[in-house]
Image: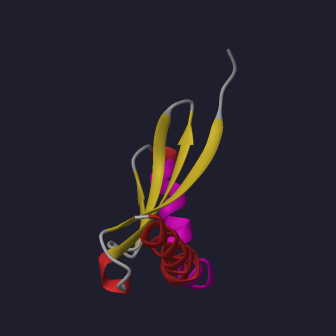
């Protein structure tokens, strides 16, 4: 019966090509997504008052924004390549 705060990183893709991959990181508090980074948009978007304030702050931090943009290649591409190979060998 308490409050829950968490973030989820996910990769949406339909091939192993980098252009077909989207990295999304959502931040949720008490079942409400308040801010999201999407590699397709290239910046954070806030959905609540707190989310909008954090989006402005994080979007103005070139280092952090660059790190998030890099996650598409570092996190998604790396894991998708591994998962695709594993799925193909089992099919």
Residue at left offset 55%, top offset 67%: 57
Residue 50 rendering spot, x and y as whole percentages: 52, 47
Residue 60 or residue 25, whichever sits in front: 25
Vertical position of residue 21 compared to residue 33: above or below: below
Secondary structure mainly formed by the magenta segment: helix
The quadrant of the image that shows the C terminus is bottom left
The quadrant of the image that shows the N terminus is top right
Residue at left offset 36%, top offset 75%: 21
The figure's colour scheme reads secondary structure
- Asked which quadrant contains residue 3, the reply is top right
The number of numbered discs placed on residues in the rendered structure image is 0
Residue 11 rendering spot, x and y as whole percentages: 45, 65
Residue 26 rendering spot, x and y as whole percentages: 50, 53
Tell me, yes or no, whether the highlighted magenta stretch contains residue 66. Answer: yes
Residue 69 or residue 19, whichever sits in front: 19
Tell me, yes or no, whether the highlighted magenta stretch contains residue 65. Answer: yes
Residue at left offset 55%, top offset 84%: 66
Q: Which residues are magenta?
A: 51-67
Q: Residue furthest right?
A: 2
Residue 65 or residue 78, whichever sits in front: 78
Residue at left offset 35%, top offset 85%: 17
């Amino acid at each position: 019966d308490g409050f829950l705060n968490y973030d989820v990183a996910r990769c949406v893709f339909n091939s192993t090509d980098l252009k077909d991959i989207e990295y999304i990181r959502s931040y949720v508090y008490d079942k409400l997504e308040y801010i999201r980074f999407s590699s397709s948009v290239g910046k954070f978007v806030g959905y609540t008052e707190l989310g909008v304030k954090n989006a402005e702050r994080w979007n103005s931090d070139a280092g952090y924004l660059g790190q998030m943009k890099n996650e598409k290649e570092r996190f998604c591409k790396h894991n998708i390549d591994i998962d695709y190979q594993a799925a193909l060998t089992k099919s």
